[in-house]
Amino acid sequence: MTAIVHPRRGAVAQALAGLLIASASCPSLGQAGGGDGLEVPGEGQGAALTVVVTGAGMPVAEAEVKITFPPGAGGEAILPTDRTGQALFSSSGTGAATVRVVATGWMTVLREVVLTQGPQQLTIRLDALRNDK
């Protein structure tokens, strides 16, 4: 599983640091292709999931997106959404995965998704936290 965040430089640097640590501890990470570990899988190479997070009809930046991959397909990864509310994950395998989104001021969402070969998108709409005080 390789994780990529676009286009913020700080988030990319943070993701790369996480990849280096994760690649050392999980052999299925960073194995997508040309050696840099940043390629999105194409057909026959695994799954690529773009998680799009919105709230009140707008993209939610800096939401924490955690994905737990199918057994043998990369463990788990956590990335922040970019300014367009997106986080891009790729996995060497396919199957059932769990996505959790946490963002300040919004209710946490947990979703199940079936990863298939090639690119796919999951849109998650967050509801604002209620202040009942």
Image: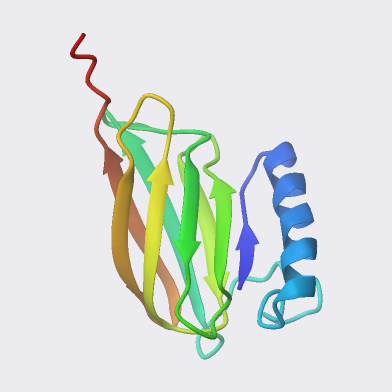
Q: What's the coloring here?
A: rainbow
124 displayed left or right of 40: left
62 displayed left or right of 57: right
User: Residue 60 at x, y = what percent?
Assistant: 42, 33
Q: State which quarter of the image contains the C terminus.
A: top left
Identify the residue at image location x=42%, y=54%.
51
User: Residue 72 at x, y = what percent?
Assistant: 54, 86
Q: List the single residue furthest toward the top.
A: 133
Which is nearer the eye, 47 or 29?
29
Identify the residue at image location x=72%, y=66%.
22
Snapshot quadrant of residue 54 = top left
Snapshot quadrant of residue 90 = bottom right
Which is nearer the eye, 131 or 60?
131
Q: Is 38 located above or below residue 65 in the figure?
A: below
Which is nearer the eye, 115 or 45?
115
User: Residue 117 at x, y = what percent?
Assistant: 44, 83
70 displayed left or right of 56: right
Identify the residue at image location x=39%, y=52%.
100
